[in-house]
């Protein structure tokens, strides 16, 4: 008998760590069903695009990947999921006359079944009302191909409704993974040999508040770090009002809870923050960063900044820049404001011109460069425990991250990949850190 031909599936992922976790779950399910995973550039029987809608650019990239798949193999089955398909399903359908399956964010647990089905899509949509979803999609993951760190999606959705953000409309309300289910997923990762897990979600700081009985992110991290002392745990992002004192103390106490924060500021101007519907003021943010630095002086602190929000004049931008210059932050993720239909700000006046936004973005990215160089410089000469990843760089050196999220290059054999190695940070060249095994 001739062996049955395997279905060739190609997948591409745009956007955040949550999307990356979900795509890893798709891959795990596809492989269990016998599918052959091929690069997205190859001809495949099925193409899966996990889209993003956080900016207009992300939406454009999502459309581009759909067109690319249709061009590579017009006869292929095309499955489109993720935030862009959730908020712009009809735009997706209008891209081509070919069969497209759209899988909403509330139905991602059915994506593998839909992708491998013999049933013709015929512009079929598996959507539903994302705002009414009460439970998080069960998406088990076995491995993250090509990655040393694993991601664990603890939470989905957002209740904040910041005026510029499309995500609550694409992801629905906050929903949490049951603690036991999350611990079981960690056990799978531990069995696969992962040494570091990034705890992530759309608003992971709200983890557990919707469960019955309610719990808190702090309590879950306490359980996980105690149960798996040999695994490093890292938080993806926290809102400023979610970095509570108990969480900081736990980070001090647990060696496997990495001293690394990523906290969105968005603007350092109180008027702009109010228009953004952000529930803190610049002085609150400054107080939090100073407190973190006092308690954990070696911690990395990353900050999101949104530049060119409607009504941001020179004084408002100067206030943001001045605040960030003064604070002991490590790095900045700088984004130009992007108008998103369906958000409150889409109807606002006072939109900032593109050239002005570009100039302001450039100023803050230069500040990011200087902040990182200063932080890296303060760590030179010290010994750090680095999770070795791979040599996929033009230096042909091993690359890995310190506890406080410093990327470092060092000579090592390939066999050290996925090992925790003591590294002395020796020098900083062109913004890059180089070290040696201690």
Image (cartoon, helix red, strand yellow):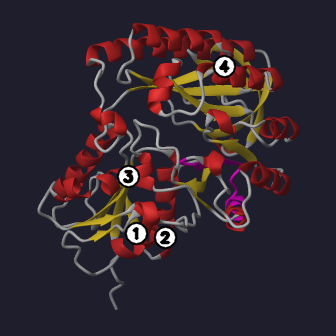
Which residue in the protein does label 3 denote? 83
Q: Where is residue 380? Give x, y as percent.
A: 74, 15
Q: Which of label 1 and label 3 is nearer to you?
A: 3
Q: Are marks 3 and 4 in contact (CB under 8 Å)?
A: no
Mark carried by residue 286 = 4
Q: CA distance from mark 3 to mark 4?
A: 32 Å
- In the displayed structure image, the side of residue 377 where residue 363 appears, left or right: left
Answer above or below: position of 317 versus 411.
Answer: above
Question: What residue is at 49 percent from the left and 34 percent from the top?
Answer: 277
Q: Which of label 2 and label 3 is nearer to you?
A: 3
Q: Are marks 1 and 2 in contact (CB under 8 Å)?
A: yes
Of mark 2 and mark 3, the one earlier in the sequence is 2
Q: CA distance from mark 1 to mark 3?
A: 14 Å
Looking at the picture, tell me which residue is in the foreground, 395 or 356: 356
Question: What residue is at 66 percent from the left and 42 percent from the top?
Answer: 235
Q: Quadrant of residue 70?
A: bottom left
- In the displayed structure image, the side of residue 165 where residue 203 appears, left or right: right
Q: Is residue 19 visible?
A: yes
Q: CA distance from mark 1 to mark 4?
A: 43 Å
Which residue in the protein does label 2 denote? 29
Looking at the picture, tell me which residue is in the foreground, 430 or 18: 18
Mark carried by residue 111 = 1
Q: Quadrant of residue 339?
A: top left
Q: Secondary structure at mark 1?
A: helix
Segment colored magenta: 186-202
Residue 190 drawn in magenta: yes
Of mark 1 and mark 2, the one earlier in the sequence is 2
Q: CA distance from mark 2 to mark 4?
A: 44 Å
Label 1 environment density (alpha carbons within 10 Å; few <14, some 14–19, many ≥20): many
Looking at the picture, tell me which residue is in the foreground, 390 or 149: 149
């Amino acid at each position: 008998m001739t062996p049955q031909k395997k279905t060739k599936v190609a997948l591409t992922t745009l956007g955040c760590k949550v999307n990356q976790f979900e795509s890893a779950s798709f891959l795990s399910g596809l492989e269990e069903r016998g599918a052959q995973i091929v690069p997205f550039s190859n001809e495949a029987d099925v193409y899966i695009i996990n889209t993003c809608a956080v900016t207009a650019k992300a939406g454009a990239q999502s459309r581009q990947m759909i067109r690319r798949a249709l061009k590579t193999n017009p006869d292929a089955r095309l499955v489109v999921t993720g935030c862009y398909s959730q908020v712009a399903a009809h735009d997706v359908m209008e891209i081509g006359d070919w069969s497209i399956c759209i899988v909403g964010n509330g139905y991602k647990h059915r994506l593998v079944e839909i992708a491998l089905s013999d049933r013709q899509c015929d512009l079929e949509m598996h959507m539903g009302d994302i705002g009414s979803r009460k439970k998080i999609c069960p998406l088990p993951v076995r491995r993250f191909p090509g990655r040393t760190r694993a991601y664990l999606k603890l939470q989905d959705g957002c209740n904040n409704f910041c005026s510029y953000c499309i995500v609550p409309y694409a992801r629905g309300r906050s929903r949490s993974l049951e603690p036991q289910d999350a611990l079981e997923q960690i056990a799978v990762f531990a069995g696969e040999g992962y040494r570091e897990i990034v705890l992530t979600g759309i608003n992971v700081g709200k983890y557990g508040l919707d469960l019955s009985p309610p719990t808190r992110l702090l309590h879950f991290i306490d359980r996980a770090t105690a149960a798996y002392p040999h695994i490093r745990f890292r938080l993806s992002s926290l809102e400023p009002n979610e970095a509570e004192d108990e969480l900081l103390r736990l980070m001090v106490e647990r060696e496997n809870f990495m001293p690394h924060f990523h906290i969105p500021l968005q603007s350092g101007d109180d008027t702009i923050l109010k228009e953004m519907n952000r529930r803190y003021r610049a002085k609150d943010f400054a107080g939090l960063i100073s407190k973190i630095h006092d308690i954990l002086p070696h911690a990395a602190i990353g900050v999101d900044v949104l530049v060119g929000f409607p009504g941001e004049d020179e004084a408002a931008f100067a206030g943001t820049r001045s605040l960030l210059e003064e604070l002991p932050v490590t790095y900045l993720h700088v984004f130009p404001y992007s108008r998103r239909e369906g958000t409150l700000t889409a109807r606002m006046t006072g939109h900032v011109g593109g050239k002005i936004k570009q100039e302001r973005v450039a100023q803050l990215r230069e500040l990011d460069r200087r902040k990182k160089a200063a932080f890296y410089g303060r760590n030179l000469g010290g010994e750090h425990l680095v999770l070795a990843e791979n040599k996929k760089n033009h230096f042909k050196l091993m690359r890995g991250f310190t506890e406080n999220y410093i990327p470092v290059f060092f000579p090592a054999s390939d066999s050290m990949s996925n090992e925790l190695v003591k590294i002395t940070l020796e020098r900083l060249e062109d913004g890059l850190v180089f070290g040696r095994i201690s």
